[in-house]
Image (cartoon, coloured by chain):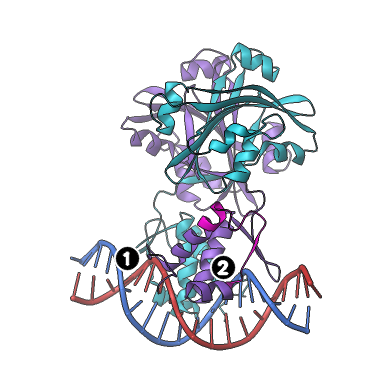
Chain colours: A purple, B cyan, C red, D blue
Amino acid sequence: MTVAGCLPKGAAYQVVQREILSRIRNKVWPPGTRIPGEIDLAAEFGCARATISRALRELAEAGVLERKRRAGTRVTLNPVRRAMLEIPMVRQQVAETGRAYGHDLLFRAVEAPPEAIRARLGLAVGVRMLHARCLHRADGRPFQTEDRWINLEAVPEAAGIDLTTTSANEWLIREMPLSSAETSLSAAAATDAEAALLGCPPGAPLLDIERTTWLGDLPITTVRLLHPPGFRVVGRV
Amino acid sequence: MTVAGCLPKGAAYQVVQREILSRIRNKVWPPGTRIPGEIDLAAEFGCARATISRALRELAEAGVLERKRRAGTRVTLNPVRRAMLEIPMVRQQVAETGRAYGHDLLFRAVEAPPEAIRARLGLAVGVRMLHARCLHRADGRPFQTEDRWINLEAVPEAAGIDLTTTSANEWLIREMPLSSAETSLSAAAATDAEAALLGCPPGAPLLDIERTTWLGDLPITTVRLLHPPGFRVVGRV
DNA sequence: TAGTGGTCTAGACCACCGA
DNA sequence: CGGTGGTCTAGACCACTAG
């Protein structure tokens, strides 16, 4: 197909997307505008309705458009800034920068979690969980501390894992793929113990990444990762 | 259509997705497995190839599958944890929690940026930019500091904005929609000045969100947002 | 070079919900 | 109610690349 008055670069649906984005940027369709329906756009661009549909669907998923049956498609009024963070496994993260990965298991026990952890996972009072702490290293230097609680009711096999050779994180990703997760980031002051582990002064600002994962409704694990000063996590939109 | 042996819940392509995810979870198709081609799956599920194609395409975008022409579709071997952060405009962020929003313009000038800022945006030596600092408040209490540099070569109109009534952020989102951005998060210790503004002790851990945006190749703005201790940003996968 | 995914079409039916 | 988006189909051609 050819698109009215412009050289087709790439797939037709992408050409349509670029043209629509261009019209929004140039205020041909300012925020809030109701844009033509799929059939009209298909006629304008000289392509099938399905092609327009895909173009618009993806723009809606990206938050650029808002679509409602019968009401039509509108340019989003208050676009939300989104940042997609990729949080790789520690081993890969370290290896990518050409450094040697290592980790020390600091602590391992099956015990009752603190109330906050228990409540976060929605587990019954009195439950016992696998609790592990470890330090991840890059070229021998501290890279990240990990404080993890695993729900043994969901993953009883975890109790038998040798955490000195395989980190809990890697084991869980391999054995429990496709879980959903909630991630939160904040800044925390290093306690004396954390400072000693990470090789920074007590009170130093640490980036704290906490992640809780479920398989369906079943809570699997919650983990707190602390990173020494200077650590950054980067996301592209 | 009906899908072999299961009650159709929702669209056919979603039924296919659920079944595929289920097979991966249950290790019918462990990580690395090459799964059947689209035509075979269409035959198995009793639907059109386009339906299978959409199901697989979305799973690939989600990082669950990896697709290559001729090589087929495989279950991703080393899935990457992704967190989608939504970073709303400050005003909305504050309003959502039922608090009153306010902001103070602390500083405004057209001046030469520090070398780091200039280089980050790829601008010419000797360029002058609009520099603004402000403090965002929730119920009168400090919520976030903003330190922003705007490329006047890209947005000359910005020089004429009254930043005391409209924050630079809101103006930019309204006037320059659909820019691409790079966001990074880290922890930083509060300087004396930052501590005074945010009402926390010097050296306190602050969550530092930095965002640089472009429109195509044209750098628009870079901003540093500092948040007092306790602030969290949450993402869902 | 053959097989895979990537895309497009023309047509169809349906669900939803605003006018 | 009727127009909109949401989905599906059967078929087709193309682009890429692994073997």
- In front of the other: label 2 or label 1? 1
Task: Report the label total.
Answer: 2
Query: What is the x, y in percent for residue A205?
Result: 55, 20
Query: What is the x, y in percent for residue A203?
Result: 58, 15
Q: Is residue A144 visible?
A: yes
Quadrant of image for the N terminus of chain A: bottom left
Q: Residue at x 48, y 68 (%)?
A: B54
Q: Residue at x 49, y 61 (%)?
A: A19
Q: Give me the chain letter of mark 1.
A: B
Is-magenta flag for residue A23? yes
Comes first in the chain, label 2 or label 1: 2
Q: Residue at x 43, y 70 (%)?
A: A3
Q: In the structure shown, which secondary structural element does the residue marked by tag 2 occupy?
A: helix
Relative to the observer, which residue lies in front, B182 or B203?
A: B182
Residue B118 image label: none
Q: Give me the chain letter of mark 2.
A: B
Task: Reply above or below: B124 against C9.
Answer: above
Relative to the observer, which residue lies in front, B121 or B33?
A: B121
Query: What is the x, y in percent for residue B50?
Result: 46, 75
How would you rate the neighbour count of disc 2 (Cα within 10 Å): few for under 14, some for 14-19, many for 20 or more?
A: some
Residue B14 image label: 2
Quadrant in the rendering for residue B99: top right
Magenta stretch in the rendered image: A21-38
Task: Reply above or below: C18 against B47.
Answer: above
Q: In the structure shown, which secondary structural element does the residue marked by tag 1 occupy?
A: loop
How would you rate the neighbour count of disc 1 (Cα within 10 Å): few for under 14, some for 14-19, many for 20 or more?
A: few
Residue under label 1 = B69
Alpha-carbon distance for marks 2 and 1? 23 Å
Amino acid type at image mark 2: Gln
Amino acid type at image mark 1: Arg
Q: Residue at x 57, y 38 (%)?
A: B157
Is-magenta flag for residue A186? no
